[in-house]
Image: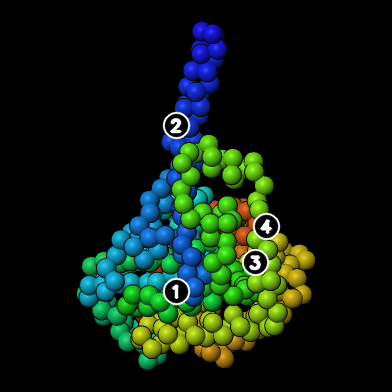
Amino acid sequence: MKVVILIILAVIGLLVVIEIGLRSLFGFGKPLIYIGDSQIGYLLAPNQSTRRFGNQIEINEFSMRSSSIAKIPASSTLRVLLLGDSIANGGWWTDQNNTISSLIMNSLKSAIADKGSRGAGEQGSRGEKENSPQLHLDKYEQVEVLNASANSWGPRNELAYLQRFGNFDAQVVVLLINTDDLFAHTPTALPVGRDRNYPDTKPPLGLIEVWQRYVSKQQPIPELKAIQEEPGDRVGVNLEAIRQIQAITRQSHSKFLLAMTPLLRELGKPGSRDYEIQARQRLSEFTKTQQIPYVDFLPLFNAAPNAPALYHDSIHMNLQGNQFVSSVILRSLLEILGLKNPNNPV
C-alpha cells in the first residue's frame, strides 16, 4: 500500500514539475484569448499580457498588440496606425520589441531625432512632396506606432476595425497585407472558441493546452466551409475594402500607405501562380488609379540576398524579415510625412 501511495505521489510530483515547466518556460496555460464580433469577425481580447516561448506579448485596451494608449494623442505625439494580420501582429514567435510596429517606431524616433538635429527648416524646403504640409519636427516629443492586427485578418476585417475604432488621430495609416489577403473571405466569428488557434477561455492547466493543441484532433467547423468557399470576385471585394480604408483616412485627414509581402513560395522561380499574378496586377493598377502609395515587397525580396532566410515559415517573417520590412516601410513613411528627400536618403 505504501508503495502505491509513493508511486501516486511521485506521479503527482512529476506532473506538477511538468506543469510548472510548461507555464514558466513556454507559456502554456496562458494563451491569448479572442472575442467574436459581428462586424470585425474576431479580435484579441483587450488588456492581455502573456509570455509564450520566451516572447513577451502585450494587448492593450483596443485589442492592439501595443502598449496602453490614449484614444486622442497629445499634440506633441507623432502617431502611425499599422493595420494587418499575423505578419503585422508577429504571433507567439515574436517578442513585443521585435514586431514590425515596434521596429518602425524605434527607427522613426531615431530618424526624426536625426532630422531635428540637422534642422527641420532645411529639410522642409527640400524634402517634402508637392502640396504636402510641412511637418514641424520640434513639436513632437513622442512617437507611437500602433499595431491593430490579428491572425488571418483580411482587408474586410481591417476595414471593420477602422470603422469601429477610428484611426486614433494617426497622421498615417499603414495597411500591411500579404498575397493571400487578396483572396480573404468575409469576416466571421465562427473560429472563436472552436478552433484551437482562437481560444475564448484560458485552459485550467498548461498540460491541458498541450493536449488540446498537439494531441487531440481538431474538430471541424462545418459552417466555416461555406464561408471559406465564398463565391464571386473576392479580389474585387477586398480591393473595395482597401478603397474604403483609404477613404476613411482621407476623411480624417490622415495619409495612407499600402504594403504587401509575398508568400515564401512566390520568391524566385517559378514565382507566383497565375491567379496570384492576375490579382497582383489588379492591385497594382488599383493603387495607381486610387493614387495610393504602394510597396510591393516581392521584387524587393527577390533582389535581397538569401531572401528565404527572412521567413519564419511559409508566410511569416522572422526577426531579420521584420527588420527588412520595417526599414522599407520607414523610408516610405518618411517620404509621406515630408521628412525624406528620395534623392537624399536618411
Reading the image, the residue beneath label 1 is 161
Callout 4–callout 3 Cβ contact below 8 Å: yes
Residue 26 screen position, x and y as percent: 49, 39
Amino acid at dot 1: Tyr
Indicate the secondary structure of the residue bearing disc 1: helix
Image marks 3 and 1: residues in contact by CB distance under 8 Å: no
Residue at screen point 52% across, 49% down: 93
What type is the residue that disc 2 sits on? Ile
Looking at the rendered image, the disc whose residue lies closer to the viewer, 4 or 1, is 4
At x 56%, y 70%, the residue is 188
Q: Which mark is residue 181?
A: none
Using the image, determine if residue 220 lies above or below residue 299.
Answer: above
Q: Nearer the viewer, mark 3 or mark 1?
A: 3
User: Mark 2 = which residue?
Assistant: 20
Q: Quadrant of residue 232?
A: bottom right
Q: Determine which residue is flagged by label 3.
A: 224
> Disc 4 residue type?
Pro
Task: Give the side of residue 173 with respect to residue 279, left or right.
Answer: left
Q: Say whether disc 3 or disc 1 marks the residue closer to the N-terminus.
A: 1
Between the residue at mark 4 and the residue at mark 3, the CA separation in whole angstroms equals 9 Å
Which residue position is annotated with label 4? 220
Q: Residues within 10 Å of mark 1 (few under 14, many from 20)?
A: many
Distance CA(mark 3)–CA(mark 2) = 36 Å
